Amino acid sequence: MDDRTLRQDIIDELDFDPSVHSSNTIGVAVRNGVVTLTGHVASFVEKLAAERAARRVAGVRALAEGIEVRYSSDKKTADDQIAERALKVIAWDARVPADAIVCTWRRGA
């Protein structure tokens, strides 16, 4: 079996497995039957399910796993969203003129 076909079979297996909800955030690379999984999932259980799904596919000779677990409580707010929220909070105060404040945010400050 060639690597391209094997990769597609693994992707199909990840999509088919009901325990893997994040199949679109898991990357699959194959070289000489050695499979590398990357990306992120929402739980450790889902990570294990993705590994098991990949191992079930005929032709997988070895599996290198690089999937990261990102819990929903770990969600980060992007810098532009923080700045936008700050501007909205300032706009809510009618005592502050609209052009009186310029928001600046620096990482680590």
Image: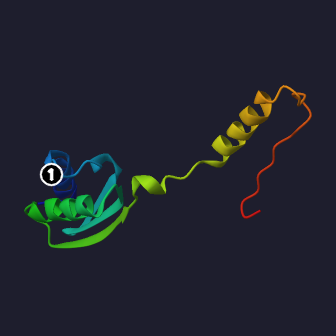
Looking at the picture, the colour scheme in use is rainbow
Residue 3 horizontal/vertical position (percent): 20, 60
Residue 14 horizontal/vertical position (percent): 19, 51
Q: Secondary structure at mark 1?
A: helix
Residue plotted at (90% across, 30% down): 99
Q: Which image quadrant for residue 26? A: bottom left
Dot 1 amino acid type: Glu
Question: Split into 4 quadrants, where in the image is the N terminus?
Answer: bottom left
Residue plotted at (54% across, 53% down): 76
33 or 89, which is in the foreground?
89
98 or 54, which is in the foreground?
98
Left or right placement of residue 50 versus residue 25 in this view: left
Left or right placement of residue 81 versus residue 28 in this view: right
Residue plotted at (21% across, 56% down): 7
Q: Which image quadrant for residue 95? A: top right
Number of marks in the rendered image: 1
Residue plotted at (88% across, 38% down): 101
Residue 2 horizontal/vertical position (percent): 16, 59
Residue 72 horizontal/vertical position (percent): 41, 52
Q: Which residue is mark 1?
A: 13
Question: Split into 4 quadrants, where in the image is the C terminus?
Answer: bottom right
